Image (tube, helix red, strand yellow):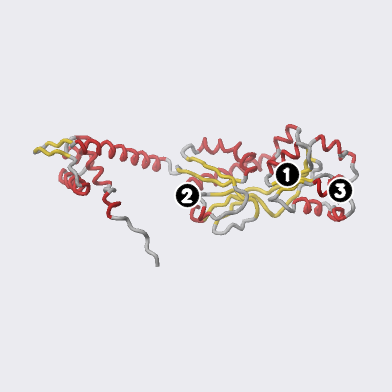
Amino acid sequence: MNSLPTESPLSKKLLPSTSMLAAFDAAARTGSFTAAAKDLALTQGAISRQVNALELQLSVNLFHRNKQNISLTEVGKIYAKEVNSALSHIRSATLNIMTNPDTGILNISILPMFGSRWLMPRLADFLAKHPQITINTVSKLSQFDFSHEDIHCAIHFGKADWSQANCTFLMAEESVPVCSPKLFEQARLAKADNICASLINLPLLHIATRPNAWPLWFDDHKVISKTKSKTKSKTKVLQDMHFEQFSIATNAAVAGLGVALLPRFLIESELQRGELQVICNKPQLTDNGYYLVSPNDKLNYAPMLAFTRWLTQVITSEKSSLSIK
Protein backbone atom coordinates (compact mmCIF):
# COMPACT_ATOMS: atom_id res chain seq x y z
CA MET A 1 0.00 0.00 0.00
CA ASN A 2 1.32 3.44 -0.91
CA SER A 3 1.64 5.77 2.06
CA LEU A 4 0.60 9.40 1.90
CA PRO A 5 3.42 11.90 1.40
CA THR A 6 4.62 13.45 4.66
CA GLU A 7 5.81 16.97 5.33
CA SER A 8 9.55 17.48 5.37
CA PRO A 9 11.19 18.80 8.58
CA LEU A 10 11.89 22.06 6.74
CA SER A 11 8.22 22.46 5.75
CA LYS A 12 7.14 22.00 9.37
CA LYS A 13 9.70 24.53 10.56
CA LEU A 14 8.43 27.09 8.06
CA LEU A 15 4.83 26.70 9.23
CA PRO A 16 4.55 27.55 12.95
CA SER A 17 1.35 26.66 14.80
CA THR A 18 -1.47 29.20 14.87
CA SER A 19 -1.28 29.28 18.68
CA MET A 20 2.35 30.44 18.47
CA LEU A 21 1.54 33.03 15.81
CA ALA A 22 -1.54 34.31 17.68
CA ALA A 23 0.46 34.73 20.90
CA PHE A 24 3.28 36.54 19.07
CA ASP A 25 0.81 38.79 17.21
CA ALA A 26 -1.01 39.75 20.42
CA ALA A 27 2.27 40.48 22.24
CA ALA A 28 3.57 42.52 19.30
CA ARG A 29 0.34 44.57 19.14
CA THR A 30 0.04 45.21 22.89
CA GLY A 31 3.74 45.41 23.77
CA SER A 32 3.21 43.18 26.78
CA PHE A 33 2.87 39.48 27.54
CA THR A 34 0.37 40.35 30.27
CA ALA A 35 -1.80 42.44 27.95
CA ALA A 36 -1.54 39.76 25.25
CA ALA A 37 -2.72 37.14 27.77
CA LYS A 38 -5.75 39.28 28.59
CA ASP A 39 -6.46 39.80 24.87
CA LEU A 40 -6.46 36.07 24.17
CA ALA A 41 -7.98 34.98 27.52
CA LEU A 42 -4.83 33.02 28.43
CA THR A 43 -2.26 33.24 31.23
CA GLN A 44 0.86 35.35 30.97
CA GLY A 45 2.92 32.18 31.29
CA ALA A 46 1.10 30.56 28.31
CA ILE A 47 1.86 33.56 26.10
CA SER A 48 5.51 33.56 27.16
CA ARG A 49 5.87 29.83 26.44
CA GLN A 50 4.28 30.15 22.98
CA VAL A 51 6.55 33.07 22.02
CA ASN A 52 9.63 31.27 23.34
CA ALA A 53 8.69 28.16 21.33
CA LEU A 54 8.24 30.28 18.20
CA GLU A 55 11.63 31.92 18.63
CA LEU A 56 13.21 28.51 19.16
CA GLN A 57 11.56 27.15 15.99
CA LEU A 58 12.66 30.15 13.93
CA SER A 59 16.09 30.36 15.56
CA VAL A 60 15.72 34.16 15.94
CA ASN A 61 14.93 36.59 18.75
CA LEU A 62 11.67 38.38 18.10
CA PHE A 63 11.63 40.48 21.30
CA HIS A 64 14.09 42.36 23.46
CA ARG A 65 13.30 41.47 27.09
CA ASN A 66 14.06 43.93 29.90
CA LYS A 67 12.57 42.77 33.22
CA GLN A 68 8.79 43.29 32.77
CA ASN A 69 9.09 45.14 29.44
CA ILE A 70 9.37 43.75 25.93
CA SER A 71 10.06 45.39 22.58
CA LEU A 72 10.28 43.98 19.08
CA THR A 73 13.66 43.40 17.50
CA GLU A 74 14.15 44.68 13.94
CA VAL A 75 13.47 41.23 12.52
CA GLY A 76 10.54 40.94 14.93
CA LYS A 77 8.99 44.14 13.52
CA ILE A 78 9.16 42.79 9.98
CA TYR A 79 7.76 39.40 11.01
CA ALA A 80 5.00 40.97 13.14
CA LYS A 81 3.72 42.96 10.16
CA GLU A 82 3.52 39.85 7.94
CA VAL A 83 1.99 37.66 10.66
CA ASN A 84 -0.65 40.27 11.50
CA SER A 85 -1.62 40.54 7.83
CA ALA A 86 -1.82 36.74 7.45
CA LEU A 87 -3.91 36.31 10.59
CA SER A 88 -6.23 39.12 9.46
CA HIS A 89 -6.81 37.27 6.17
CA ILE A 90 -7.54 34.05 8.04
CA ARG A 91 -9.99 35.80 10.39
CA SER A 92 -11.73 37.44 7.45
CA ALA A 93 -11.96 34.17 5.52
CA THR A 94 -13.28 32.36 8.61
CA LEU A 95 -15.90 35.02 9.27
CA ASN A 96 -16.94 34.92 5.61
CA ILE A 97 -17.35 31.15 5.72
CA MET A 98 -19.33 31.32 8.97
CA THR A 99 -21.70 34.02 7.73
CA ASN A 100 -21.80 32.87 4.08
CA PRO A 101 -21.51 29.08 4.04
CA ASP A 102 -22.19 28.93 0.28
CA THR A 103 -19.10 30.96 -0.61
CA GLY A 104 -16.53 29.56 -3.02
CA ILE A 105 -15.59 29.01 -6.65
CA LEU A 106 -17.77 27.01 -9.03
CA ASN A 107 -16.22 25.71 -12.26
CA ILE A 108 -18.87 24.71 -14.81
CA SER A 109 -18.49 22.92 -18.14
CA ILE A 110 -21.21 24.09 -20.51
CA LEU A 111 -22.39 23.28 -24.00
CA PRO A 112 -21.51 26.36 -26.13
CA MET A 113 -24.97 27.12 -27.53
CA PHE A 114 -26.81 26.26 -24.31
CA GLY A 115 -24.38 28.39 -22.37
CA SER A 116 -24.51 31.46 -24.61
CA ARG A 117 -28.21 31.37 -25.52
CA TRP A 118 -29.92 30.01 -22.39
CA LEU A 119 -27.65 30.09 -19.33
CA MET A 120 -25.84 33.43 -19.72
CA PRO A 121 -28.98 35.60 -19.99
CA ARG A 122 -30.20 34.07 -16.70
CA LEU A 123 -26.91 33.82 -14.80
CA ALA A 124 -27.06 37.41 -13.51
CA ASP A 125 -29.98 36.32 -11.32
CA PHE A 126 -27.87 33.59 -9.70
CA LEU A 127 -24.92 35.94 -9.12
CA ALA A 128 -27.22 38.55 -7.57
CA LYS A 129 -28.58 35.94 -5.15
CA HIS A 130 -25.13 34.44 -4.46
CA PRO A 131 -22.58 37.28 -4.79
CA GLN A 132 -20.08 35.31 -2.71
CA ILE A 133 -19.80 32.58 -5.38
CA THR A 134 -17.39 33.04 -8.28
CA ILE A 135 -18.34 31.18 -11.46
CA ASN A 136 -15.85 30.08 -14.12
CA THR A 137 -16.99 28.33 -17.32
CA VAL A 138 -15.38 26.21 -20.01
CA SER A 139 -17.03 24.92 -23.18
CA LYS A 140 -17.05 21.20 -23.89
CA LEU A 141 -19.14 19.23 -26.37
CA SER A 142 -18.49 15.71 -25.13
CA GLN A 143 -18.21 13.77 -21.89
CA PHE A 144 -14.93 13.85 -20.00
CA ASP A 145 -13.38 12.39 -16.87
CA PHE A 146 -14.10 14.60 -13.84
CA SER A 147 -11.04 13.16 -12.10
CA HIS A 148 -8.80 14.77 -14.71
CA GLU A 149 -10.62 18.11 -14.93
CA ASP A 150 -10.93 20.88 -12.35
CA ILE A 151 -14.70 21.00 -12.94
CA HIS A 152 -17.44 20.92 -10.30
CA CYS A 153 -20.33 20.21 -12.68
CA ALA A 154 -21.26 20.00 -16.35
CA ILE A 155 -24.38 20.67 -18.40
CA HIS A 156 -24.66 17.64 -20.66
CA PHE A 157 -27.01 16.58 -23.47
CA GLY A 158 -27.70 12.90 -23.80
CA LYS A 159 -28.73 10.27 -21.30
CA ALA A 160 -28.17 9.96 -17.55
CA ASP A 161 -25.24 7.64 -18.11
CA TRP A 162 -22.24 9.62 -16.84
CA SER A 163 -19.91 7.36 -14.86
CA GLN A 164 -19.20 8.15 -11.20
CA ALA A 165 -21.54 11.15 -11.28
CA ASN A 166 -25.04 12.27 -10.38
CA CYS A 167 -27.30 13.40 -13.25
CA THR A 168 -30.13 15.86 -12.57
CA PHE A 169 -32.63 16.12 -15.44
CA LEU A 170 -33.17 19.71 -16.59
CA MET A 171 -35.26 19.67 -19.75
CA ALA A 172 -36.08 17.83 -22.96
CA GLU A 173 -35.19 19.12 -26.40
CA GLU A 174 -37.74 19.89 -29.14
CA SER A 175 -36.08 20.57 -32.47
CA VAL A 176 -38.08 22.12 -35.30
CA PRO A 177 -37.18 22.57 -38.99
CA VAL A 178 -36.35 26.20 -39.70
CA CYS A 179 -34.99 28.26 -42.55
CA SER A 180 -34.65 31.87 -43.59
CA PRO A 181 -37.78 33.63 -44.92
CA LYS A 182 -35.98 34.09 -48.23
CA LEU A 183 -35.36 30.35 -48.66
CA PHE A 184 -38.91 29.62 -47.55
CA GLU A 185 -40.16 31.92 -50.31
CA GLN A 186 -37.78 30.61 -52.98
CA ALA A 187 -38.70 26.99 -52.25
CA ARG A 188 -42.41 27.85 -52.36
CA LEU A 189 -42.91 25.82 -49.20
CA ALA A 190 -46.15 27.61 -48.39
CA LYS A 191 -47.71 26.02 -51.50
CA ALA A 192 -46.28 22.53 -51.01
CA ASP A 193 -48.79 19.66 -50.87
CA ASN A 194 -46.60 17.81 -48.37
CA ILE A 195 -44.28 20.25 -46.69
CA CYS A 196 -42.39 17.54 -44.79
CA ALA A 197 -41.65 15.63 -47.98
CA SER A 198 -40.64 18.86 -49.72
CA LEU A 199 -37.73 19.36 -47.34
CA ILE A 200 -35.89 16.34 -48.72
CA ASN A 201 -35.20 18.30 -51.91
CA LEU A 202 -33.69 21.27 -50.05
CA PRO A 203 -30.13 21.62 -48.73
CA LEU A 204 -30.11 20.25 -45.19
CA LEU A 205 -27.84 21.51 -42.43
CA HIS A 206 -26.46 18.74 -40.22
CA ILE A 207 -24.90 19.07 -36.75
CA ALA A 208 -22.12 16.76 -35.56
CA THR A 209 -23.62 16.21 -32.10
CA ARG A 210 -26.97 15.20 -33.66
CA PRO A 211 -25.81 13.04 -36.62
CA ASN A 212 -29.11 11.16 -36.98
CA ALA A 213 -31.43 14.13 -36.45
CA TRP A 214 -32.67 14.49 -40.03
CA PRO A 215 -33.10 10.75 -40.78
CA LEU A 216 -35.07 10.35 -37.54
CA TRP A 217 -37.21 13.39 -38.28
CA PHE A 218 -38.05 12.13 -41.79
CA ASP A 219 -38.77 8.70 -40.36
CA ASP A 220 -41.11 10.18 -37.71
CA HIS A 221 -43.04 11.98 -40.44
CA LYS A 222 -43.15 9.02 -42.84
CA VAL A 223 -40.75 10.55 -45.36
CA ILE A 224 -37.83 8.20 -44.84
CA SER A 225 -38.67 6.09 -47.90
CA LYS A 226 -38.45 9.15 -50.10
CA THR A 227 -34.81 9.65 -49.12
CA LYS A 228 -34.04 6.51 -51.09
CA SER A 229 -35.88 7.67 -54.17
CA LYS A 230 -34.56 9.51 -57.17
CA THR A 231 -35.25 12.83 -55.46
CA LYS A 232 -32.19 12.13 -53.30
CA SER A 233 -29.81 12.78 -56.17
CA LYS A 234 -26.04 13.17 -56.07
CA THR A 235 -26.45 16.89 -56.54
CA LYS A 236 -28.72 17.04 -53.50
CA VAL A 237 -26.20 15.19 -51.34
CA LEU A 238 -23.50 17.71 -52.22
CA GLN A 239 -25.79 20.56 -51.18
CA ASP A 240 -25.99 19.33 -47.59
CA MET A 241 -23.61 20.94 -45.11
CA HIS A 242 -22.23 19.68 -41.81
CA PHE A 243 -21.33 21.74 -38.75
CA GLU A 244 -19.75 21.01 -35.39
CA GLN A 245 -21.81 23.48 -33.38
CA PHE A 246 -25.39 24.73 -33.23
CA SER A 247 -24.28 28.36 -33.35
CA ILE A 248 -22.63 28.01 -36.77
CA ALA A 249 -25.53 25.96 -38.14
CA THR A 250 -27.92 28.65 -36.89
CA ASN A 251 -25.93 31.36 -38.69
CA ALA A 252 -25.91 29.23 -41.85
CA ALA A 253 -29.69 28.86 -41.69
CA VAL A 254 -30.11 32.62 -41.20
CA ALA A 255 -27.88 33.15 -44.27
CA GLY A 256 -30.23 31.01 -46.33
CA LEU A 257 -27.79 28.13 -46.85
CA GLY A 258 -30.30 25.45 -45.98
CA VAL A 259 -32.85 24.02 -43.57
CA ALA A 260 -31.77 23.20 -40.02
CA LEU A 261 -33.31 21.16 -37.22
CA LEU A 262 -32.75 23.39 -34.20
CA PRO A 263 -34.01 23.39 -30.60
CA ARG A 264 -36.72 26.02 -30.42
CA PHE A 265 -35.60 27.39 -27.04
CA LEU A 266 -32.11 28.13 -28.41
CA ILE A 267 -33.28 30.19 -31.41
CA GLU A 268 -35.94 32.35 -29.76
CA SER A 269 -34.14 35.59 -30.70
CA GLU A 270 -33.83 34.63 -34.40
CA LEU A 271 -37.51 33.67 -34.51
CA GLN A 272 -38.58 36.91 -32.81
CA ARG A 273 -36.48 39.02 -35.19
CA GLY A 274 -37.85 37.18 -38.21
CA GLU A 275 -34.42 35.92 -39.28
CA LEU A 276 -35.68 32.34 -39.11
CA GLN A 277 -39.13 30.84 -39.41
CA VAL A 278 -40.51 27.47 -38.46
CA ILE A 279 -41.36 25.58 -41.62
CA CYS A 280 -43.80 23.21 -39.96
CA ASN A 281 -44.63 22.84 -36.31
CA LYS A 282 -43.66 19.19 -36.13
CA PRO A 283 -40.88 18.95 -33.53
CA GLN A 284 -38.47 16.11 -33.15
CA LEU A 285 -38.67 14.45 -29.74
CA THR A 286 -35.86 12.20 -28.52
CA ASP A 287 -35.06 10.11 -25.47
CA ASN A 288 -32.11 12.39 -24.75
CA GLY A 289 -32.24 15.49 -22.60
CA TYR A 290 -30.23 18.18 -20.84
CA TYR A 291 -28.72 17.16 -17.50
CA LEU A 292 -26.73 18.87 -14.79
CA VAL A 293 -23.96 16.40 -14.00
CA SER A 294 -21.78 16.55 -10.90
CA PRO A 295 -19.16 14.06 -9.70
CA ASN A 296 -20.13 12.10 -6.62
CA ASP A 297 -17.37 13.63 -4.50
CA LYS A 298 -18.66 17.17 -5.22
CA LEU A 299 -22.35 16.62 -4.43
CA ASN A 300 -22.16 18.31 -1.03
CA TYR A 301 -19.99 21.23 -2.19
CA ALA A 302 -21.96 24.31 -1.06
CA PRO A 303 -21.66 26.37 -4.31
CA MET A 304 -22.66 23.23 -6.25
CA LEU A 305 -25.77 22.78 -4.09
CA ALA A 306 -26.70 26.45 -4.48
CA PHE A 307 -26.32 26.30 -8.27
CA THR A 308 -28.35 23.10 -8.51
CA ARG A 309 -31.20 24.59 -6.46
CA TRP A 310 -31.21 27.78 -8.49
CA LEU A 311 -31.06 26.04 -11.88
CA THR A 312 -33.90 23.62 -11.14
CA GLN A 313 -36.03 26.46 -9.70
CA VAL A 314 -35.54 28.60 -12.83
CA ILE A 315 -36.47 25.74 -15.15
CA THR A 316 -39.50 24.76 -13.07
CA SER A 317 -40.66 28.39 -12.98
CA GLU A 318 -40.31 28.82 -16.74
CA LYS A 319 -42.11 25.55 -17.42
CA SER A 320 -44.99 26.71 -15.19
CA SER A 321 -45.11 30.03 -17.00
CA LEU A 322 -45.33 28.32 -20.39
CA SER A 323 -48.09 25.96 -19.21
CA ILE A 324 -50.14 28.93 -17.99
CA LYS A 325 -49.84 30.60 -21.38
Q: Earlier in the sequence, mark 1 or mark 2?
A: 1
Sooner in the amino-acid sequence: mark 2 or mark 3: 3
Q: Residue 37 placed where, x, y %?
A: 19, 41
Q: Which residue is mark 2?
A: 301
Q: Secondary structure at mark 2?
A: loop
Q: Amino acid at mark 3?
A: Ala
Q: Is residue 162 above or below residue 188?
A: below
Nearest the viewer among 62 and 308 is 62
Please give left or right for residue 125 compared with residue 196 in the image: left
Would you call the spot at circle 1 few (<14 residues within 10 Å), some (14-19), or many (20 or more)? many
Which of label 1 and label 2 is nearer to you? 1
Residue wearing tag 1: 262
Q: How many marks?
A: 3
Q: Residue at x 81, y 41 (%)?
A: 279
Q: Which label number is shown at residue 197?
A: 3
Based on the displayed image, in which of its 4 quarters is residue 65 positioned? Answer: top left
Local crowd at mark 3 within 10 Å, few (<14), some, or many (≥20)?
Answer: some
Where residue 100 sits: x, y (%)? Answer: 43, 41
Are dots 1 and 2 in contact, CB under 8 Å?
no
> What's under tag 2, amino acid-wise?
Tyr
Q: Nearer the viewer, residue 71 or 38?
A: 71
The earlier-in-sequence mark between 1 and 3 is 3
Q: Where's residue 195, x and y in %?
A: 86, 44
The image quadrant that residue 34 belongs to is top left
Whether the residues at callouts 1 and 3 have beta carbons within 8 Å, the answer is no
Looking at the rendered structure, the kind of residue marked 1 is: Leu
- Please, which residue is most extreme toward the left here? 67
Q: What is the distance, in whole Å, between disc 2 and disc 3 at their CAs?
A: 51 Å
Local SS, label 1:
strand
Residue drawn at the location 79% of the way across and 42% of the way down: 258
Q: Relative to residue 69, is residue 126 drawn left or right? A: right
Residue 6 visible to an observer of this rendering: yes
